[in-house]
Amino acid sequence: MRHKTPPMTKQQIDALTPFLDIFTQPGYRPYLPEAEMTMALPDPPEVEAFRNIYLDVCQDVAPAGALAGDPPGLDPTELYIHFSNPEAMATASANQIRRYLLVTYRGDYHGFLATANKIASGVIPAALRRLLELRAEAPE
């Protein structure tokens, strides 16, 4: 069943995309040094700030719902895996990116450093680049 999800706005895109410059700096690592890691705060401040913003931006997307443009026949788990590489993210819709981020948060919630891992692997930077491409089509 496809959920009627409102389109991502320019303002929402603009809230996320400034993090692209941070996450793509040469030598950037989205992890705290091991000596500073705790279960309560496992990420550096900019990763936490990004997550707090994307949670707000993504709140009206159903994490298990199918969206227009989803590859047919994939369940929500397979959709997450499908978009878990920079190449696939380069073709994602804005709402597919929002859903991806929301499901990524669930990994963070369970202590898997999911957001940091997706930044390090290039998936989240690819998603932010894609949002910059899609910005012109987004409603105000």
Image: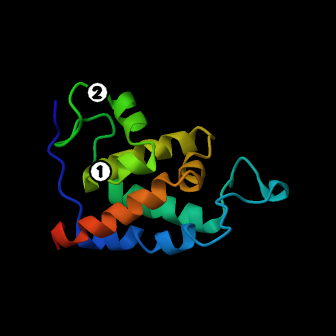
Q: In the figure, 75 relative to 104: above or below?
A: above
Label 1 – label 2 distance at C-alpha: 15 Å
Q: Decide if residue 102 is on the left or right side of residue 40.
A: left
Q: In the figure, 18 relative to 43: above or below?
A: below
In percent of width and height, residue 3 lies at: 17, 39
* Label at residue 74: 2
In percent of width and height, residue 120 lies at: 59, 54
Tag 2, which secondary structure? loop
State if disc 2 and disc 1 touch (CB < 8 Å): no
- The residue depicted at 31 percent of the width and 34 percent of the height is 64
In percent of width and height, residue 135 lies at: 25, 70
Name the residue beneath numbered marker 1.
92
Mark 1 neighbour density, 10 Å: few (under 14) some (14–19) many (20 or more): many
Q: Decide if residue 66 is on the left or right side of residue 90.
A: left
- The residue depicted at 62 percent of the width and 40 percent of the height is 112
Q: Amino acid at mark 1?
A: Ala
Q: Decide if residue 108 is on the left or right side of residue 140.
A: right
Task: Indicate the quadrant containing the N terminus: top left, top right, bottom left or bottom right.
Answer: top left
Task: Indicate the quadrant containing the C terminus: top left, top right, bottom left or bottom right.
Answer: bottom left
